Image (cartoon, rainbow, N blue to C red):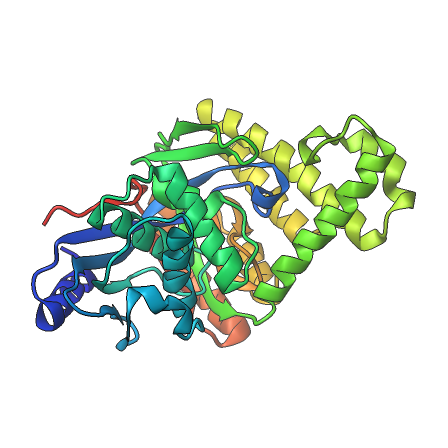
Amino acid sequence: MDEVLEHILWLFGSRYGEPQLVIASPGRINIIGEHVDYNDGYVMPAAIDRYIWGAFSISNGETHIFAANLGREISFDINQVDTCDFSGWNAYVLGVIREMQRRGVGIRNFNLVFGGNIPIGSGLSSSAALENCIAYGLSSLFDLGFDRKDLIFISQKAEHNYAGVQCGIMDQFASMFGHRNNAIFLDTKTLEYEYLELDMKEWEFVLVNSNVKHSLVSSEYNKRREQCSEGLEIVKQHFRQVQSFRDITVDMLGDIEQLISDINFKRVKYVVEEIDRTQRAKDAIKQGKWQELGQLLTKTHEGLRDLYGVSCPELDLLVDKALQHPGVTGSRMMGGGFGGCTINLVRKDQIEDFSGYIIHEFYNNFTLHADVYRLEIVDGTGVVEL
């Protein structure tokens, strides 16, 4: 048993007695399809063995929620959630509760201790894992009858309405629907999905965490959504057959370049190209063409850097240095941007050498320590059998 989970169970026992339910909700990587989940694109996430855990029981008094990683507790009556402080991590937890209450379900007072081993700010979707943990846990504890798709929309609405990030559905979907040793090819417009077995043989996905988190990420994320929306509207006015980004071809972009601002054109161009790359990546995985997949990852980074404008010097250096290593066939920044992780496709017999090399190069350039993560691809949110 993971030591973080052991600590959560000990805390719960010392404060509230025996838990009735324990939930594990994983973080995620996104292999390709970055910043297109809110643009009706295709994405390719996978759930990973980094978790938010929650231990639950029904309370005979007030609701008590204890954040194990922070050592902080809030207590309130479940019918007076609106009087609580919604700042910080509270927004994700209380937001899920409020979104469930809006649906008219009977949540009663409960006890909860939660915590995890997903590095905060790394781009591994700790917020979606937390939201899913709360949503799945409350639905199970009170037998509310929500299915997994209901729960991911509850989690997404909590992030929109209380955390203030207008995220797409990918993070919540990947965390909830993950399948061991499989990536998910997800159509974010229809939510149709396909599992892709990751029979990677001599290759492995390796993350490098810059441990950098620039404050731009939230405001710039929402700004990119606005820019994409503005750009799409201009394309739709010029081409009546266009309903979403997936209807736009590269040839169309040339026709509308003079009708759209330079910045919005770059955003649209990136999204159109990334939707195409993700479909080609699906074929590469099915055919076991891992070096071709690596090339697509690198092209995605170039687009995120040059067209979408969400990279930063630290991430660019990690990618540039990774691509200079003989064991790496592709590298890109992953997640919202302005910090967090890169995802790298590395030969398994080169991972140890790559890890030492990339840590050394990053420290030499920024006097900062990077962390290297090897991962397992796991199942999605569910009950922990103790």
Q: Image check: 243 left or right of 153?
A: right
Depth order, front residue of 133/278: 133
- Residue 147: give x, y in percent of width and height: 33, 37
Depth order, front residue of 76/131: 76
- Residue 153: give x, y in percent of width and height: 45, 45
Q: Is residue 89 visible?
A: no
- Residue 73: give x, y in percent of width and height: 27, 75
The residue positioned 78% from the left and 26% from the top of the image is 241
The residue positioned 48% from the left and 37% from the top of the image is 44
In this view, the residue farthest toward the top is 287
In this view, the residue farthest toward the right is 258
Q: Tell me if residue 163 comes above or below residue 272 in the rendering.
A: below
Q: Is residue 159 visible?
A: yes
Give the image quarter of residue 91: bottom left
Q: Looking at the image, how many numbered discs can be counted on the residues?
A: 0
Give the image quarter of residue 202: top left
Depth order, front residue of 77/150: 77
Quadrant where the N terminus sits is: bottom left
Depth order, front residue of 35/166: 166
- Residue 7: give x, y in percent of width and height: 16, 67
The residue positioned 57% from the left and 72% from the top of the image is 215
Q: Image check: 249 left or right of 139?
A: right
Q: Tell me if residue 378 comes above or below residue 241 in the rendering.
A: below
